[in-house]
């Protein structure tokens, strides 16, 4: 299992901003190892976020996204104490979900 995501969520007025640092190797499938063999593709395909169980963001990613990607998004609503959950699924079928509380 990969390392947990670092999630920070902050409410300001009627807008909540969420910042996420995802821990993932994100191999494109185009790089070669020391022996000259192609390193198999391994990347996040979908990312989604929920606020108190309601979807607020979804994205489709591909092999061009960098290792340990950072993403930021905002949505209307949210207040201190609400829960934000971020989930990703990669092309190997691995999945991870982490949660944070809005500050």
Image: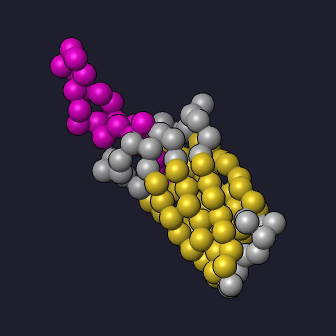
In terms of depth relative to the viewer, which is nearer, 19 or 34?
19
Q: Main secondary structure of the magenta part?
A: loop
The image shows residue 35 at horizontal and vertical percentages of 21, 14
Q: Is residue 52 visible?
A: no
Most extreme residue toward the bottom is: 14
Q: Residue at x 29, y 36 (%)?
A: 29
- The answer, for residue 89, to whether it is visible in the render is yes
Q: Residue furthest right?
A: 81
Comparing 41 with 27, the one in front is 27
Q: Residue at x 39, y 42 (%)?
A: 67
Where residue 25 sits, quadrant-wise, is top left
Q: Is residue 87 left or right of residue 32?
A: right
The single residue placed furthest to the left in the displayed view is 36
8, 41: nearer the viewer:
8
User: Where is residue 82, by image quadrant?
Assistant: bottom right
The residue drawn where x is 68% and y is 74% is 11
Q: Where is residue 27? Give x, y as percent.
A: 35, 37
Left or right relative to 6: residue 11: right
The x, y position of residue 64, in whole percent, is 30, 50
Instruction: Name the spot of residue 9 as percent of width and height, x first.
Output: 65, 64
Q: Which residues are magenta?
A: 25-46
- Total number of numbered discs in the rendering: 0
Residue 94 found in image quarter:
top right
Q: Residue at x 66, y 69 (%)?
A: 10
Question: What is the quadrant of the N terminus in the image?
Answer: top right
> Is residue 37 shown in magenta?
yes
The relative height of residue 68 versus residue 10 in the rendered view (above or below) is above
Vertical relation: 54 (above or below) 24: below
Quarter of the rendering occupied by the C terminus? bottom right
Q: Is residue 100 magenta?
A: no
Tell whether 38 sits left or right of 21. Answer: left
**Would residue 4 appear left or right of 66 to someone viewing this image?**
right
């Amino acid at each position: 299992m990969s390392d947990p995501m670092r999630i920070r969520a902050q409410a300001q007025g009627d807008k909540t901003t969420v910042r996420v640092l995802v821990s993932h190797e994100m191999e494109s499938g185009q790089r070669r190892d020391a022996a000259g063999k192609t390193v198999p593709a391994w990347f996040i395909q979908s990312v989604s976020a929920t606020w108190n169980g309601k979807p607020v963001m979804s994205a489709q990613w591909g092999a061009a996204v960098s290792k340990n990607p950072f993403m930021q998004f905002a949505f209307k609503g949210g207040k201190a104490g609400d829960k934000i959950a971020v989930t990703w699924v990669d092309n190997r079928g691995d999945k991870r979900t982490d949660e944070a509380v809005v500050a």
